Amino acid sequence: MTMHKIQLPAAQPLLNGKGWSAFIVALLAVCAVAPILNLLVPQGSVFHMSDYAVALVGRIMCYAICALAMDLIWGYTGILSLGHGVFFALGGYAMGMYLMRQIGRDGNYKSDLPDFMVFLDWKTLPWHWSFSDSFMATLILIVAVPGLVAFVFGYFAFRSRIKGVYFSIITQAMTFAAMLLFFRNETGFGGNNGFTDFKRILDLPIATQEMRMTLFVLTGLTLLGFFLLARGLVRSKFGRVLQAIRDAESRVMFSGYSPLGYKLTIWTISAVMCGIAGALYVPQVGIINPGEMSPANSIEMAIWAAVGGRATLVGPIVGAFVVNGAKSWLTVAYPEFWLYFLGGLFIVVTLFLPDGLVGLVKKIKGAKVMSDAGPSQVAKAPSGGSEAHEVASVGAKP
């Protein structure tokens, strides 16, 4: 009996040399360059990084974490979610509850209860505010609440084999229902106004330059850490199965794999990432309200991933910076044209740049390499032999 040996693709490093160099540059920019330019360089200098720029970039980095989470489920697993805004908001509300308790008696009503509860004539805290005065409990809730909601929702949705546009519609309905729920005053989340007027975090003043930069650095480190985590996931066997599910789920099932566990795991991880992003977002912008759960916010997350380039990890981060940077400028210079720009950008990317900005850069580099090599060198390039062909055939998409 003849035994055929199958050669699996060799394990790839987390990052190559250029990748690690770029990562170290980004790390230094977040941890050293930005703090120096903001805290040490005088305000009159052209090199000074203003507090507005710190807040803007910090907020965009929170969005970039959401775009990265969207890439894991949409770009690598083929699950288009239009409801990830609810996980972002849940993490933000968990942090907001803690920040409201940190106000103490410095509120308008000089009460131990948050001002909106005093206004509504509440006498005690609701049960779900029981651990809101503990920072460690808040950290647990930031991870547990979005993760648990995603796990329960995903289990029933994936077990029922809901996919495609039907899954997208259901996720959008979920976030819309959650938004309506949080608008109600009796839920204990501040109703239409949400939470604002934060004073302290860990008993330290929140509206200081040093605290803003601390939150900026923490957000940057979280983004870089999640990037490495996502890179490790997609380059592992787990990630290869996710991509196989994206390309041909029925063939994966025929091969003996159950897609439920894989889809549920990556779905929960992406929800937790959005929850952590929301928790970092709230103290930097100073407010959280049900508007963060609007379906439009979840759609924007998908646009960031599409503009930057799906299934690239770097692309969604680039897309988040490009789109939100343009939004920040256009909403001031031409506020009436912002939504037209966003819709037109999505149409252009869909029709002419299906691989996003990162895909466009790769095509330009590939065309340049081909032109530099010349047709004769391309024709003489070795095919790699039967061994290379075998490895390529095993690792190819179905």
Image: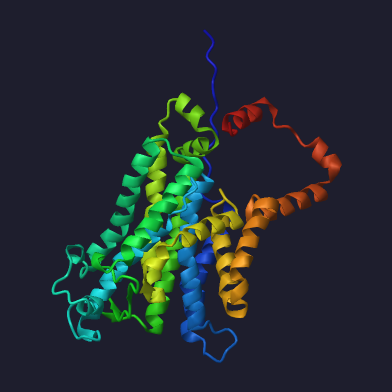
Q: Return the residue nearer the eye: 366 or 3.
A: 366
In which image quadrant can residue 121 be found?
A: bottom left
Residue projecting furthest to the bottom: 44
Q: Return the residue nearer the eye: 371 or 123.
A: 123
Q: In the displayed structure, does residue 46 sit left or right of residue 123?
A: right
Is 62 situated above or below 255?
A: below
Report the quarter where the C terminus lies.
top right
Q: In the displayed structure, does residue 155 sit left or right of residue 332?
A: left
The answer to whether residue 275 shows anywhere in this view is no
Q: Return the residue nearer the eye: 271 or 296.
A: 296
Looking at the rendered structure, the number of numbered marks drawn on it comes to 0
Q: Residue at x 50, y 41 (%)?
A: 164
Colour logic: rainbow
- Measured as percent of width and height from the top left, residue 102 is found at 24, 77
Q: In the displayed structure, does residue 309 sit left or right of residue 383?
A: left
Q: Residue at x 57, y 75 (%)?
A: 331
Is 386 situated above or below 188?
A: above
In which image quadrant can residue 10 be found?
A: top right
Q: Residue at x 29, y 65 (%)?
A: 94
- Measured as percent of width and height from the top left, residue 182 is found at 32, 64
Q: Return the residue nearer the eye: 318 or 287.
A: 287
- Measured as percent of width and height from the top left, residue 157 is found at 38, 41
Residue projecting furthest to the left: 123
Q: In the displayed structure, does residue 61 sit left or right of residue 104?
A: right
- Measured as percent of width and height from the top left, residue 297 is found at 47, 62
The answer to whether residue 44 shows anywhere in this view is yes
